Image (spheres, rainbow, N blue to C red):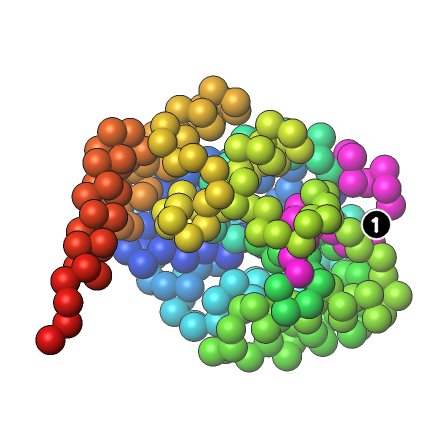
Amino acid sequence: MEKRICLLAGYDKNNTIEDYVVFLVQELSKISDVYYFADGEMPAAELGKIRPYTEYAESAPHQGHDFGSWQYLIHYIGWNKIGQYDEMIICNDSIYGPMTSMQDIFDYMELRGYDFWGLTENYHSNYHLDSYFMVFNNDILKNIKFQEFWKNITPGFNRKTYETVLTPFLTELGFVGNSYIKNYKKDDILAYPLHLLETKKMPFIRIKSLKEPEFHLKEPVFNIDGRIRKKSGYDTGMIKKHLAAVDDFSGFGIKYYLKNTVNTLKSKFDNFIPRI
């Protein structure tokens, strides 16, 4: 069995470690040694929720987004220690899950012999693997240029800048990478979470697909929590609790439907009124 290290980047505007994050850390700790760092000021009591499942859990404001948190953890751990692992995972907490077996996915991808891989691929700006979950093998971890890449992360840069660069950067170094789920239509495939869960055993659902379904979800939102629970067994109460904490959330049932209908009618009415 491969020995893995996982660098988990966290963020919560209320400086709270929600139940879904605790579950994510618990599950990641079953396949890797987890190191957690959040951009913010998490109280000790909040960090205490995940400390039993991590090798390290701290936070500090740094405005470096995910890549800044991963950079901090790399500096804290050191490449000598990281190089003792067979694989390094980078992950963030912008996802709900896992809802399927992570070990099965690792087994599937390791049979294919990739140097690095991600769960999904993206064609926005350029072809690249989505950085919310990526895996790198030991050859990459010991590569000087890869280490320099992380040393040169600059706070304040948009995380997408580094996400879109990382895949072609590794490819130019001669490493071979791929995606667990292929995106042949070059679409926003994360907007189809139930389809991916059912047909590809996708372990995660992007938070913003459920937080802002009008922009990031291309499946029916009504009772989506019940359908997720039925297909995966995942405790969707954690999803509803998190969304209620970060936004004006009315659930995925009749209240959501009525609220959405009222807002749609109000918008049409406002647009209908002639401007003077």
Is 168 magenta? The answer is: no
The residue positioned 24% from the left and 41% from the top of the image is 261
Residue 184 or 262: which is nearer the viewer?
Answer: 262
Question: In the visual, does 206 lie left or right of 116?
Answer: left
Residue type beneath disc 1: Tyr
Image x and y of residue 96, in percent: 47, 40
Image x and y of residue 180, in percent: 72, 43
Read off the magenta span.
Answer: 107-123
Q: Is residue 257 visible?
A: yes
Q: Residue furthest left?
A: 276
Residue 159 or 28: which is nearer the viewer?
Answer: 159
The residue positioned 71% from the left and 63% from the top of the image is 127
Image x and y of residue 103, in percent: 69, 32
Q: Is residue 25 above or below residue 274?
A: above
Question: In the visual, does 148 lie left or right of 218?
Answer: right
Question: In the visual, does 110 lie left or right of 79?
Answer: right
Quarter of the figure with the C terminus: bottom left
Q: Is residue 62 above or below residue 111?
A: below
Residue at which label 1 appears? 114
Q: Is residue 76 visible?
A: no
Quarter of the figure with the N terminus: top right
Are there few (<14), some (14-19), or many (20+) residues within 10 Å of tag 1?
some
Image x and y of residue 72, in percent: 54, 67
Is 114 magenta? The answer is: yes
